[in-house]
Amino acid sequence: MKAKILKTEADYAAALAYVETLMDAKPDTPEEEELDLFSMLVEQYEREHYPIDPPDPVEAILFRMDQQGLTRVDLVPFIGSQSKVSEVLNRKRPLSLAMIRNLHRGLGIRADTLLQERGATLGQPQYDPANYPITEMVKRGYFAGWNGSPRDARQYGEELLNKFFAVFGASHPRQVYCRRTDAPMNTHALMAWQARVLRLSQEKTLPPYIPEAMDEAFFRRIARASFFQNGPLLVETLLNQHGIHFVVLQHLPQTHLDGASFFSPQGEPVIALTLRHDRLDNFWFTLAHELGHLHLHLPDDELAFFDDVEQDEHGDTDPRECNANAFARNLFISPAQWQAHGESLLAAQRDKDVLVLAEELEISPAIVAGRIRWESGDYTRHVQLIGQGKVRSQFPGFGNG
């Protein structure tokens, strides 16, 4: 019989029958070489078509306990507590990747047995649960389908994070640029927030994004939306019509984040706001700032911009941030308009002057008031006009993940 790769059951049966005829082959003969060759072909076919399931992980643990004379108490360092040991051994709690690593290292039980996947190995964890605000992420529903407690989520954190961050696809998230904050930045929490934004954006199918459609008329419609009380709600429709995802998502602790702009792995633009400051002037400036990044800087740089716009922007050194700031200011009040009205507004300090200009420009008075406060550096001015507490109430789901 001619040796060949076995592809069918008929090939396999014929090879088995041929092996039987070679079983009495003498050492160092051509027949023995054929026996070795056909035995290897048969074994390869059986591995592919008749795989033997790995041993049950609980049985493997019990076997190792019996071998080494261990009690359930001895498993606590590897599994976590006596109650968890009991639940695992009674098959009421699945092994987490953290448990599997501990049992593999500590007791030498094969990784593929514990993973229930033949030939599987344990690489280094891609995400360390200790780096992420797991408790807060659970409370806000970041982990779809997870019904356990935050404490249990930390135990199964590695697998939860592996699934959660799969939204980024094969590549890691783009480089993040954070600006103007002196407080420590938790970049892991920032990445988690971005992943959640991406998952929320995937829930909606939009028309193709056409950069050329972001013209003067489009930006005028954005500015005009601010004139209406429900303007923040109108933004989503306006952006979606142009293929731009818009997400409002509360920031995670230690991210000091107002807004972000980036492209999804599928090449779709995303603008997300946190409403960290519940004020209309902050909402409209942050939105315009992120639109500036999208219009001026993305996607050529293939970056993600994450912005804290509340700090004093006079200290910006990144030219892209300076450009986005200027774009945001000019979107609502052009340089010519400010030149015509700015000096008198700064000198008069009267709310009615703010309202008159806002009516003339058909924009929110909060935007004019915010511009005056920034230009003067006096944030005690026009407090009644900045729209304090007027944004979050328009987004009923705000704060729920």
Image (cartoon, rainbow, N blue to C red):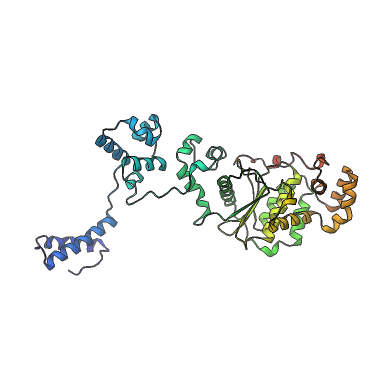
Q: Height in image: 2 above or below 93?
A: below
Residue drawn at x 81%, y 43% as measured from the top left: 378
Residue 149 visible (yes or no): no
- Residue nearest the viewer, comparing 14 with 332: 332
Q: Within the image, what quadrant is residue 109 found in? A: top left
x and y, in percent, of residue 81 in the image:
40, 31
Task: Name the spot of residue 59 as percent of width and height, x first.
Answer: 29, 39
x%, y% of residue 117? 34, 49
User: Which residue is drawn at the image coordinates 83% and 52% (left, top)?
Assistant: 362
Residue at 83% over, 41% down? 382
The count of marks equals 0
Q: Do we see residue 129 in this rendering? A: yes
Horizontal arrangement in the rendering, residue 45 relative to residue 148 (left or right): left
- Rendering quarter of residue 16: bottom left
View extreme (bottom): residue: 2
Left or right? Give the position of 291 relative to 353.
left
269 left or right of 118? right
Image coordinates of residue 358 in percent, x first then y, are: 84, 49
User: Is 85 drawn above or below residue 211 in the view shown?
Assistant: above
Left of 209 or right of it: where is 361? right
Q: Give the camera-side residue of 312 and 66.
A: 312
Name the image quarter holding the N terminus. Answer: bottom left
Quadrant in which the C terminus is drawn? top right
